[in-house]
């Protein structure tokens, strides 16, 4: 008859509606589907329940002169074969399906929801029992079972729909269990339990409110299904008997008059269909599913005006000049970033989250997220301009000349295919060899990245590998096209420190042995000190200091770099641990609200009035630069970023504006 | 119990530890399959004195978070005891604990998931107070002053978590732990989700609060540098067993267990020249690859990765023994090279 | 893998047993007795009692249940209270009708749904919006109403196909096929809509995965990213929904068979329910459950073949 909405949980964000918005119009009423759904459902429910008060004719009243009439002023919807008014009959018929579907919902949620909460709380033993029994219930052909129920208890719709509610509670349970389990994994549940909140209160105060959206979505969907089932039963003759009206039987009646009065089919069918559509639209709107916001077709990147400058550094293999990245029709994410990479060296882009380092790295391969693009500047790779290349031209560069490894090795590999499949494909494509030869090369590549049992790993699937092993496989994959540049985006952040050391050693060996150049993105200054030749420190979308890693880290010029180093608890050998760490007050300003002049000024210990006016980057550290107007003052006074005195952290801090949660990081 | 001879001269009875963990064993799951696999926590014992911070370090899968959960009562231990201020709470339900011992609280790792987004900061902070019998204006007053004590304005009680940054949320989580005036706080990786500068703010705050209030911290972390900053003593954990424990300076500067050596030498320092020297030293150690074959059940769990391993290591589990200032579970602790 | 199959198999057997037990208890919990049905209206209390005695209705419940199970293992579903015919034989004749409708409708909705869903996710833009919105409406339409409209348009207005009736395959394969077209089309409308939504959501999710970015960074051709990697990723949820969908379509056949006057299981169910023919009702439920369970078991194997996490568990 229709399908159970088992997908509800997958499509719904289980976060409760942020309360800030709750005071205004609910989110679902801002979508056209939600407005229509809610309005129609309210209308049909009110109109049906009050039908006896306003209907123009009694449901049994026959206008024998006007049988099978088309709509007219007397009969807005026309009349049926006995000359009865369709408008009166349709709305009078509405209350039974609406109320019995509501009853079905109450029963289904009354059983399914508490059972799901219980199973999620009590863990695997209880869950196994309840889940198995509901799986059985769900595998039963519900509609046919319902016929058996009617065969036994007769045409009594309310008890029949209540029994359907019992059957459907299995589907409710299944969806709610998934949601409840994921909510229970949130730490605020554990925090409440440690606080000593009882099971009932934890569920009522913390678990249920977070499930409200999914409950609403599934209820709306099931309501629509209930209506269809009631109408279907009436169609089969298991509804209220004549002369009482019912939607299903009116359609059955109409199907007998297809030759002489096809109109008869329209009013009842449209009202029923609209009601079910309304329920489903409401569900979609509550779920926040943007049916109307299907991602636009990938558009070709607009060519960006490129300043055609001769490379300033002829030895550079990659030269980035004045690069800007921006959200299309939105704020800038990266501005005026310049750096050069010499062949066979490692450049680090370092900074805190939100500073634009990942966007910069991804723009090098043209792999920015949808809706974000390079808005200016130049990326010269081996003398060739990459900004403005078509998707096709970039595809030819990717993998062959520039490859990439990412932060989460466990999800960077396709879970559905074996490692062998994922390596052999690119090897054949890049090196033009046969399947057998490609497999040999794959095994060799794995051995080169330090995997001893290459044959076993080739046969495995990603979920069977540890994080460190998966990152090695990712590096091997990146090497299949024998690239000259590797972009590594936080390659060790997700790994244990001992595994990180191994991966860094592997990368260093690759650079040393094959002359590979590497751009590594990291938030960890220790990683930068370990592997980088040069470093560019980024803050709020700009490079604030660059130079050789030794110069920048041992003798930082920019206050931000000083502060970052001071905040690092890893002290040099033999030095005592400081009593307090240097810290930076406040937070990084989000894109779109960067101040003019120095973006760090508002948090800087050394800021003066002149810092708020724009100024250019100054040369520093030989070939590097520093973006601080006071750099000479600070150098001459040997300024250091000091930790605030004891107790400073407990002085009330200004509450920031809502944290930036734009889709870009 | 009679005092041992010679103890009569000591006039002060040493205070009971704030937190005492004895022979803790935790197994996940049940049935035959669970009994065959190695337990997540395998006979761990240590104490935390009042006002002391003990850092619990180890890699993922070492069981450090499991110990935190067992202490908090979120994961029932298979055997062993947990005492807070001398009171055995191992078998107490969470509800009983909050009523009888309001002395144990927690700060979790992820400040985004640890605050209920649908409830105001005030509601979150008042929740534990209500269960302790502090209600109405008194509770809200306490919530406000709690926020001020972590460097946030008291008016923030009316706001929702989404209006705060990660570092500020972590301060709120700390305030929630501290409004009940606990004696022991479990800090489960409280700064690993934060950026460096924010991390420093929160670490400084934790140090301040501890010193102001004489709190005891069980500080769970994977970063030895962070542990060294905040802790007095360290417990190094590997596959559910204690490898080494002792004063934090001794463990981090002169480790006596090969695994501690592996951990400390792998942590990079932000000074290129020094880091190059450390790296060379680390590579000279010849540590085995992480995640190598699993160890035998009877011997030392670190055998597959250990450059010093001999037959005895695979056969006998080394007991913790005192070497210099720290306890080390290694047959060959004397042969461990200096860092 | 073996453990997975064993688990699924035991679940299947459990489901069939549950169906037997539930319907059996249901019949006995009702106020009606088979004797009253068999004796017909107007029978005296004594006649009804005699009939019940003959049918074994007065024996203890568990005796009746195990007796029924015993017959079930010999594929004996008893005889109809109305016409005395063998229920197993009757349902055996009807099963092919319903099975072919449900099977063809499932296949059709799978093919059409996946095509539409993948198109919506990959092409996006106005076409994607049209497909998503259209599917949202299509899955809300009552199948019997759609059926009547389909009959009106294709059979009455255009006179392309027979409006109702069923021709067995053995007597005329072409007529058999023609008699199935309208019912299958009617059932497939809603089915295809649901599959399309699942496939579109699955594809969109797949295309947002980190491993897809890895493939892009490797310069993998776009068609390969979409139709090898993303499609495979989204296939598991689609197959899972297909299993649920088959149950729904099988149930939906009750209405379709009524509408198109097809002598299938659903029709038997409807008639038995109307006439309170208890043994026939239990029989219909059992046969329907067995079919559904077998199809779901096959789909479970497909999931295992598709998803290495299931296969290697």
Image (cartoon, rainbow, N blue to C red):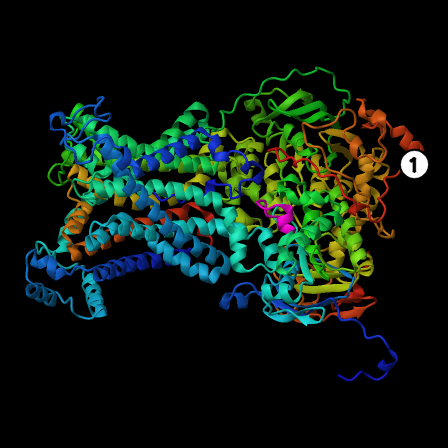
Which sits in the foreground, B146 or A607? B146
Give x and y (percent) for residue B131.
Answer: 61, 59
Q: Which residue is mark 1?
A: A638
Evaluate whether residue B167 shows in this view.
no
Q: Secondary structure at mark 1?
A: loop
Relative vertical location of residue A71 with respect to residue A575 in this rendering, above or below? above
Which sits in the foreground, C195 or A249? A249
Task: Name which residue lies at 18% across and 47% down.
Answer: C270
Give x and y (percent) for residue B58.
Answer: 69, 57
- Label 1 chain ID: A
Which sits in the foreground, A280 or B331? A280
Q: Is residue A207 left or right of residue C58?
A: right
Q: Quadrant of the N terminus of chain B?
A: bottom right
Magenta region: B115-125
Residue B121 forms part of the magenta stretch = yes
Give x and y (percent) for residue C244.
Answer: 34, 46
Evaluate whether residue C47 shows in this view.
yes
Q: Quadrant of residue B17?
A: bottom right
């Amino acid at each position: 008859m229709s399908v159970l909405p088992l997908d509800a949980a997958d499509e719904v964000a289980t976060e409760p509606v942020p309360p800030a918005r709750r005071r205004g119009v609910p989110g679902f009423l801002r979508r056209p589907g939600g407005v229509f759904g809610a309005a129609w459902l309210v209308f049909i429910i009110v109109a049906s329940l009050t039908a006896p008060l306003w209907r123009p004719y009694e449901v049994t009243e026959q206008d024998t002169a006007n049988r099978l009439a088309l709509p007219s002023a007397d009969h807005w919807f026309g009349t049926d074969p006995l000359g009865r008014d369709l408008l009166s009959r349709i709305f009078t018929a509405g209350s039974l399906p609406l109320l019995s579907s509501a009853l079905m919902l109450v029963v289904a949620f009354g059983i399914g929801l508490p059972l799901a909460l219980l199973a999620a709380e009590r863990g695997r033993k209880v869950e196994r029992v309840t889940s198995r029994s509901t799986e059985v219930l769900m595998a039963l052909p519900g509609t046919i079972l319902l016929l058996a129920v009617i065969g036994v208890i007769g045409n009594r719709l309310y008890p029949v729909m209540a029994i359907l509610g019992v059957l459907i509670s299995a589907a409710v349970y299944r969806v709610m269990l998934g949601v409840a389990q994921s909510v229970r994994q949130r730490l605020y549940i554990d925090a409440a339990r440690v606080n000593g909140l009882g099971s009932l209160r934890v569920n009522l105060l913390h678990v249920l409110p977070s499930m409200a959206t999914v409950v609403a979505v599934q209820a709306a969907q099931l309501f629509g299904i209930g209506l269809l089932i009631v109408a279907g039963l009436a169609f089969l003759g298991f509804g209220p008997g004549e002369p009482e009206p019912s939607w299903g039987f009116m359609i059955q009646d109409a199907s007998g008059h297809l030759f002489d009065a096809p109109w008869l089919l329209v009013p009842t069918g449209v009202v029923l269909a609209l009601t079910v559509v309304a329920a489903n639209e409401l569900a979609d709107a509550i779920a926040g599913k943007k049916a109307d916001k299907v991602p636009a077709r990938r558009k070709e990147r607009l060519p960006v005006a490129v300043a055609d400058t001769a490379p300033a550094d002829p030895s550079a293999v990659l030269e980035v000049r004045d690069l800007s990245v921006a959200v299309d029709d939105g704020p800038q994410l990266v501005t005026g970033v310049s750096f050069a990479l010499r062949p066979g060296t490692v450049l680090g882009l370092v900074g805190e989250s939100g500073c634009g380092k990942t966007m910069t790295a991804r723009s090098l391969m043209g792999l920015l997220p949808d809706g974000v693009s390079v808005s200016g500047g130049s990326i010269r790779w081996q003398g060739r301009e990459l900004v403005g290349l078509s998707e096709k031209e970039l595809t030819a560069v990717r993998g062959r000349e520039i490859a990439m490894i990412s932060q989460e090795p466990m999800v960077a590999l396709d879970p559905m295919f074996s490692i062998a499949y994922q390596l052999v494909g690119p090897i054949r494509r890049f090196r033009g060899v046969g399947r057998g030869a490609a497999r040999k090369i794959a095994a060799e590549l794995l051995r080169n990245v330090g995997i001893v049992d290459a044959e076993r790993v080739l046969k495995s699937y990603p979920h069977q590998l540890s994080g460190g092993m998966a990152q090695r496989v990712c590096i091997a994959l990146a090497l299949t096209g024998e690239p000259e540049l590797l972009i590594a985006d936080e390659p060790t952040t997700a790994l244990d420190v001992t595994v990180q050391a191994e991966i860094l050693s592997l990368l260093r060996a690759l650079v040393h042995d094959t002359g590979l150049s590497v751009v590594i993105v990291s938030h960890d200054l220790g990683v930068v000190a370990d592997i980088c030749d040069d470093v560019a420190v980024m803050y709020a979308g700009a490079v604030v200091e660059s130079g050789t890693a030794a110069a920048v880290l041992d003798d930082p010029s920019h206050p931000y770099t000083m502060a970052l180093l001071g905040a690092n608890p890893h002290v040099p050998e033999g030095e005592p641990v400081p009593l307090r760490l240097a810290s930076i007050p406040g937070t990084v300003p989000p894109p779109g609200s960067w101040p003019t002049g120095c973006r760090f000024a508002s948090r800087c210990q050394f800021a003066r009035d002149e810092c708020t006016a724009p100024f250019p980057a100054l040369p520093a550290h030989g070939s590097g630069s520093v973006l601080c107007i006071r750099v000479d003052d600070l150098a001459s006074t040997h300024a250091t970023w000091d930790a605030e005195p004891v107790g400073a952290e407990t002085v009330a801090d200004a509450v920031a504006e809502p944290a930036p949660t734009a889709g870009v990081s | 119990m009679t005092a041992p001879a010679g103890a009569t001269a000591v006039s002060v009875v040493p205070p009971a530890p704030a937190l005492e963990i004895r022979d803790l064993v935790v197994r996940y799951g049940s049935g035959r399959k669970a009994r065959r696999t190695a337990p997540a926590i395998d006979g761990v014992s240590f104490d935390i004195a009042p006002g002391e911070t003990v850092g619990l370090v180890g890699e993922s899968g070492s069981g450090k978070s499991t110990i935190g959960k067992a202490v908090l009562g979120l994961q029932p231990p298979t055997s062993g005891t947990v005492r807070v201020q001398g009171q055995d709470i191992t078998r107490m339900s969470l509800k009983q604990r909050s009523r009888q011992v309001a002395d144990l609280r927690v700060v979790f790792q992820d400040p985004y998931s640890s605050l209920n987004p649908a409830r105001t900061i005030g509601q979150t902070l008042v929740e534990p107070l209500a269960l302790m019998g502090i209600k109405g204006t008194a509770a809200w007053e306490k919530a406000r002053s709690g926020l001020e004590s972590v460097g946030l304005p008291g008016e923030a009680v009316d706001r929702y978590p989404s209006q705060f940054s990660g570092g500020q949320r972590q301060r709120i989580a700390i305030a929630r732990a501290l409004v009940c005036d606990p004696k022991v706080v479990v800090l489960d990786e409280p700064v690993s989700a934060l950026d460096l500068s924010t991390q420093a703010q929160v670490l400084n705050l934790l140090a301040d609060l501890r010193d102001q209030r004489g709190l005891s911290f069980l500080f769970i972390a994977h970063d030895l540098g962070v542990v060294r900053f905040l802790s007095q003593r360290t417990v190094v954990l590997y596959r559910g067993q204690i490898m080494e424990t002792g004063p934090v300076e001794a463990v981090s500067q002169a480790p006596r267990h090969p695994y501690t050596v592996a951990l400390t030498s792998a942590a990079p320092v932000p000074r290129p020249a020094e880091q190059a020297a450390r790296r060379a030293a680390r590579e000279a150690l010849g540590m085995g690859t992480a995640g190598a074959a699993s160890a035998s059940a009877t011997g030392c769990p670190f055998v597959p990765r250990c450059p010093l391993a001999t037959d005895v290591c695979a056969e006998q589990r080394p007991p913790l023994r005192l070497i210099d200032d720290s306890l080390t579970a290694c047959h060959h602790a004397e042969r461990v090279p200096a860092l | 893998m073996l453990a997975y199959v064993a688990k699924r198999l035991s679940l299947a057997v459990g489901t069939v047993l549950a169906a037997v037990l539930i319907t059996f208890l249901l019949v006995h919990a009702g106020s009606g007795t088979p004797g009253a049905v068999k004796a017909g209206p107007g029978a005296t209390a004594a006649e009804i009692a005699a009939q019940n005695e003959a049918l074994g209705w007065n024996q203890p419940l568990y005796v009746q249940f195990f007796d029924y199970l015993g017959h079930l293992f010999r594929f004996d579903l008893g005889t109809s209270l109305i016409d005395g015919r063998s229920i197993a034989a009757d349902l055996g004749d009807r099963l092919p009708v319903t099975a072919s409708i449900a099977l063809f409708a499932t296949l059709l909705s799978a093919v059409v749904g996946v095509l539409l869903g993948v198109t919506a996710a990959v092409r996006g833009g106005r076409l994607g919006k049209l497909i998503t919105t259209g599917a949202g409406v299509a899955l809300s339409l009552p199948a019997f109403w759609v059926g009547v409209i389909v009959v009106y348009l294709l059979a009455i207005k255009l006179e392309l196909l027979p409006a109702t009736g069923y021709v067995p395959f053995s007597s005329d394969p072409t007529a058999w096929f023609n008699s199935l077209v309208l019912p299958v089309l009617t059932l497939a409308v809603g089915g295809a809509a649901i599959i399309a939504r699942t496939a579109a959501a699955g594809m969109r999710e797949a295309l947002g995965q980190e491993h897809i970015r890895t493939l892009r960074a490797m310069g993998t051709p776009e068609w390969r990213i979409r139709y090898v990697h993303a499609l495979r990723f989204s296939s598991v949820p689609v197959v899972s929904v297909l299993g649920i969908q088959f149950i729904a379509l099988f149930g939906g056949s009750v209405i379709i068979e009524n509408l198109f006057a097809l002598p299938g299981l659903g029709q038997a169910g409807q008639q038995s329910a109307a006439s309170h023919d208890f043994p026939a009702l239990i029989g219909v439920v059992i046969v329907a459950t067995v079919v559904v369970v077998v199809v779901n078991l096959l789909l479970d194997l497909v999931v295992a073949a598709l998803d290495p996490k299931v296969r290697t568990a």
